[in-house]
Image (cartoon, rainbow, N blue to C red):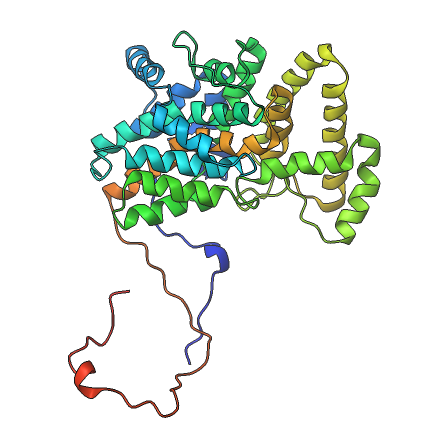
């Protein structure tokens, strides 16, 4: 029997080309269409980065003005989408809300089955504009609050925070939020992106691919990790408890969420940028009390202790979770925020897959019982005579 090498989790397997993003091993930088993400986060609004991912180049001033005008005009939720969100139980996970809402948007789109690039760009821009309202309204309804209508005089980050909290955010907060959206926007063939590409390879519509990606992102080993970071912080309680808590966690062989990454072996290149944004939030919110300072102390203590013991460094979820917490987002809302960002990368990959498509259908190595038969069974020769030897599968 020929020896078959199984690549569990497809580790180390190249399945296709992509021009959307890569990690440059020489500089340990994540590149979006060739641009280091830290440079984009330092200089660009999220709207410009979305444009870059979809069109391949940063927009001119005129292109950006047209793009943002369209986004601002399409922010409001349609009544049927809001009503569908209201039907989702309050104890359901917010990712279930997004899965449902996006599916309804797709079902209501008469062009859903038009898989041309031009049509998919329209759908991508529409979801980009509407996802913030879905996320914001879901958090508000869980607190017994009504919807806050979008404002066209605010940029993407400002409006997202406005719709969630009902106040125009301080520039420091809006800036940190913009940075987080850019850092989460794209990361090559991660689990949710690959899910979207697999679905696209069947020539299903863009909405189906996005709904599948949302399902993949919900898992704590992928998008749910930023939620898990705050659950860990809640367990530990304070910086002084880090040592004993970590002793127990490591003895129990628990996975410490927020540390380590499948791609980065020398630390996630996005962390310094997000940590700098978190530091600005800690300074900003420290004027309101000790909570931000205590959170920062816990953050630093756990990072220092874990890195010294295990040599494993934080990933993006580690600083983003505390940052979203300080902004006022519910922990369950963290992964939906990831969706609102990653919709740009997902749809860029969906369109790239569709442009040069081949059905993604890997092989499997069977290790079950050898062929066996039902005792006493006699095949109906007439019924099977003209049957094809193998189904399409």
Q: Residue 54, relative to residue 68: is it above or below?
A: below
One can see residue 110 in this view? yes
Which quadrant of the view contains residue 113? top left
Q: Is 103 rendered above or below residue 140? A: below
What residue appears at the point 73 percent right and 41 percent down from the top-left corner? Answer: 306
Residue 20 visible to an observer of this rendering: no
Position of residue 333 in the picture relative to residue 64 (left or right): right
Closer-to-camera residue (370/91): 91
Residue 257 in the figure: left or right of residue 365: right
> What is the residue that sits farthest to the bottom in this orientation?
376
Q: Is 16 drawn above or below residue 115 in the view shown?
A: below
- The percent coordinates of residue 383 (x first, y second) are 19, 82
Query: In terms of depth relative to the viewer, which is nearer, 71 or 98?
Result: 98
Q: Quadrant of residue 322?
A: top right
Q: Reply above or below: 286 against 193.
A: above
Q: Residue 236, percent across and down?
A: 77, 36
Q: Nearer the viewer, residue 34 or 330?
A: 330
- Estimate the x, y position of residue 227 in percent, counting from the top left: 60, 36
Left of 62 or right of it: where is 152?
A: right
Residue 160 falls left or right of residue 109:
right
Residue occupying the point 55% across, 16% down: 165
């Amino acid at each position: 029997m020929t020896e078959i090498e199984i690549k569990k989790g497809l580790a180390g397997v190249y399945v296709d080309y992509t021009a959307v993003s890569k990690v440059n091993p020489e500089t340990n930088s994540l590149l979006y269409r060739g641009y280091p993400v830290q440079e984009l986060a330092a200089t660009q609004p999220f709207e410009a980065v979305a444009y870059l991912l979809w069109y391949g180049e940063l927009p001119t001033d005129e292109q950006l003005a047209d793009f943002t005008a369209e986004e601002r005009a399409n922010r409001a939720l349609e009544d049927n989408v809001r009503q569908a969100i209201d039907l989702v139980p309050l104890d359901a996970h917010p990712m279930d809300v997004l899965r449902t809402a996006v599916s309804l948007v797709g079902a209501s789109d008469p062009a859903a089955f038009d898989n041309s690039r031009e049509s998919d760009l329209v759908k991508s821009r529409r979801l980009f504009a509407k996802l913030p309202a879905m996320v914001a309204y879901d958090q508000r309804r869980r607190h017994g609050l009504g919807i806050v209508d979008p404002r066209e005089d605010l940029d993407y980050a400002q409006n997202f925070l406005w719709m969630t909290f009902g106040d125009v955010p301080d520039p420091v907060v809006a800036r940190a939020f913009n940075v987080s959206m850019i850092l989460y926007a794209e990361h090559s063939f991660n689990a949710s992106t690959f899910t979207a590409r697999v679905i696209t390879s069947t020539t299903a519509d863009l909405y189906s691919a996005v709904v599948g990606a949302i399902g993949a992102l919900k898992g704590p080993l992928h998008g749910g990790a930023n939620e898990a970071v705050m659950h860990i912080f809640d367990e530990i309680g304070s910086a002084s408890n880090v040592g004993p808590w970590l002793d127990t966690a490591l003895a129990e062989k628990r996975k410490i969420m927020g540390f380590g990454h499948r791609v980065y072996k020398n630390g996630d290149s996005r962390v310094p940028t997000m940590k700098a944004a978190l530091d600005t939030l800690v300074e900003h919110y420290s004027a309101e009390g000790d909570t931000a300072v205590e959170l920062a102390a816990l953050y630093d203590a756990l990072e220092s202790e874990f890195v010294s013991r295990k040599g494993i460094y934080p990933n993006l979820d580690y600083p983003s979770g505390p940052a979203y917490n300080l902004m006022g987002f519910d922990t369950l809302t963290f992964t939906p925020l990831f969706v609102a960002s990653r919709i740009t990368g997902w749809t860029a990959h969906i369109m790239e897959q569709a442009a040069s498509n081949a059905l993604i259908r890997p092989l499997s190595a069977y290790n079950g019982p050898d062929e066996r038969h039902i005792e006493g069974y006699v095949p109906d020769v007439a019924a099977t005579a003209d049957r094809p030897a193998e189904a399409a599968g």
